[in-house]
Amino acid sequence: MTPRPLTCREAVRRISQALDTVLSEADRAALEAHVAECEACERARAQADFMRRAMQRWRAYRESE
Amino acid sequence: MSDASSRDFARQVEQLRPDLLRFARTQLRNEAWAEDAVSEAVLAALEKPFAFEGRSQLKTWLVGILKFKCVDQLRRHTREATVLVGEDGEDLDESLFEDSGHWRTMPGSWGRGEEALAQRQFFEVLERCHALLPPVQARVFMMREWLELDAAVICKELQITSTNLWVLLHRARLRLRECLEQRWFDTREGP
């Protein structure tokens, strides 16, 4: 049986979770399928990745002060 | 280490105390905890000066010790899982998503993100946005994103489940995202 497609709310939760743990193959596939079709969630994922880089840069900036 | 070298080492460590305090305040968001963490880190450094082998800068070494002391403070002062998840403020989910699960508003493109990372003002905004996070979300978020602790380590230190942790981190990231979008990127598009 084909899994139900994710909603954006669910996809954003998985995007966050993927930053902290390895998603199962099924979860990752469902997320990728959703992001491929959803510009909003594609942007949300890019934003999540950006915030991680921003935190790393902020820490480096603070440690160098 | 000779007496003169010990005094010189102690003086150098003390000179870095303000920097260490600034770092700890950002992480812990509590003045008393930050002072305790720094005092413990300084004490640990002065008790074992030979552990600093000069391979890195003194500040880098001290910050490494301080990170562990910050985790100790968080472990001592953060409460149980059910309380953690229940007291962390309004859930943004409702305002960001319709009942159907779709976004209410298209997220901004943040196309100039890399430019932002080169600007001091952006980090001032980021710091303000972080300061607006509910305390528990802020602490957990900083343990993950600033101290770069693994999720499993955070769960063990705070005695929370991985589900609790993901909920807290998810909420913190949504809030931070909203704040940056409003205060920096300001690129809202209609539905």
Image (cartoon, coloured by chain):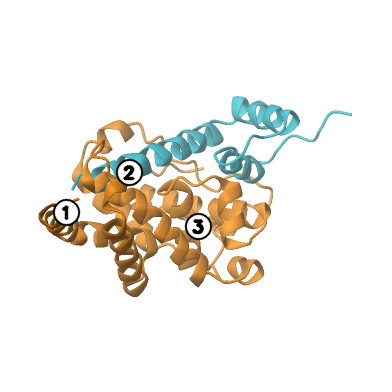
Chain colours: A cyan, B orange
Residue B186, how many percent across, how many down? 33, 46
Residue B95, how many percent across, how many down? 55, 58
> Are the residues under badges 2 and 1 in a single subunit?
yes
C-alpha distance separating marks 3 and 1 = 34 Å
| Residue located at (57% from left, 62% from top) | B158
Label 3 packing within 10 angstroms: few (<14), some (14-19), many (20+)? many
For the question of whether residue B184 can be seen, the reply is no
Mark 2 or 3: the one toward you? 3
For the question of whether residue B117 can be seen, the reply is yes
Mark closer to the chain start, 3 or 1: 1
Left/right of residue A28 with respect to residue B172 in the rendered view: right
| Residue located at (89% from left, 29% from top) | A1
Left/right of residue A49 with respect to residue A27 in the rendered view: left
**What residue would you read off at disc 3?**
B140
C-alpha distance separating marks 2 and 3 = 25 Å
C-alpha distance separating marks 2 and 1 = 45 Å
**What residue would you read off at disc 2?**
B185
Mark 2 or 1: the one toward you? 1
Label 1 packing within 10 angstroms: few (<14), some (14-19), many (20+)? some
Dot label at residue B86: none
Left/right of residue B18 with respect to residue A56 in the rendered view: left
Callout 3: SS: helix
Chain holding disc 3? B
**What residue would you read off at disc 1?**
B9
Residue type for callout 2: Phe
Callouts 2 and 3 close, C-beta under 8 Å: no
Chain holding disc 1? B
